[in-house]
């Protein structure tokens, strides 16, 4: 959801959430779907770091950093009642 929100904010193509890694890193997928390079390199690095985490605590910390980063870049948004629904345990 956060990835989709920020991608739309940047006016970048959005593909299904389960293909984030491919969308950010796989040149074949990018060519196949005519997806340009992700415009925010720092965000891309943060997402790659977060999705590579294996420990729940580290994963949650990474995603909090991402939300804070997006909040700063977009000028803020309200997360009223927002919570992580996806289990983060391995």
Image: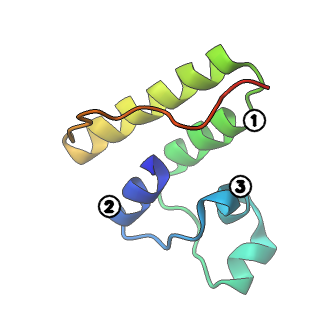
From mark 2 to mark 1, how far is it between C-alphas? 24 Å
Return the x and y of residue 15 as percentages of the image width and height: 57, 71
Return the x and y of residue 36 as percentages of the image width and height: 57, 74
The residue positioned 80% from the left and 26% from the top of the image is 90
- Left-right relation of 60 to 26: left
- Left-right relation of 10 to 23: left
Question: Residue tagged by mark 2?
Answer: 9
The residue positioned 29% from the left and 37% from the top of the image is 71
Looking at the image, is mark 3 or mark 1 earlier in the sequence? 3
Return the x and y of residue 5 as percentages of the image width and height: 38, 56
Looking at the image, which is closer to me, 41 or 35? 35
Question: Residue tagged by mark 1?
Answer: 52
The residue positioned 52% from the left and 31% from the top of the image is 63
Q: Are marks 2 and 1 in contact (CB under 8 Å)?
A: no
Residue 8 in the image: above or below residue 78: below
Q: Quadrant of residue 34?
A: bottom right
Question: Residue tagged by mark 3?
Answer: 21
């Amino acid at each position: 959801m956060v990835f989709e929100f920020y991608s739309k904010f940047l006016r970048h193509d959005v593909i299904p959430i389960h293909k984030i890694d491919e969308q950010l890193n796989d040149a074949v997928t990018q060519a196949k779907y005519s997806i340009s390079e992700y415009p925010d390199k720092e965000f891309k690095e943060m997402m790659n770091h977060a999705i590579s985490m294996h420990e729940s605590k580290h994963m949650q910390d990474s995603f909090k950093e991402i939300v804070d980063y997006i909040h700063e870049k977009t000028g803020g948004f309200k997360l009223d009642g927002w919570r992580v629904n996806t289990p983060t345990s391995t």
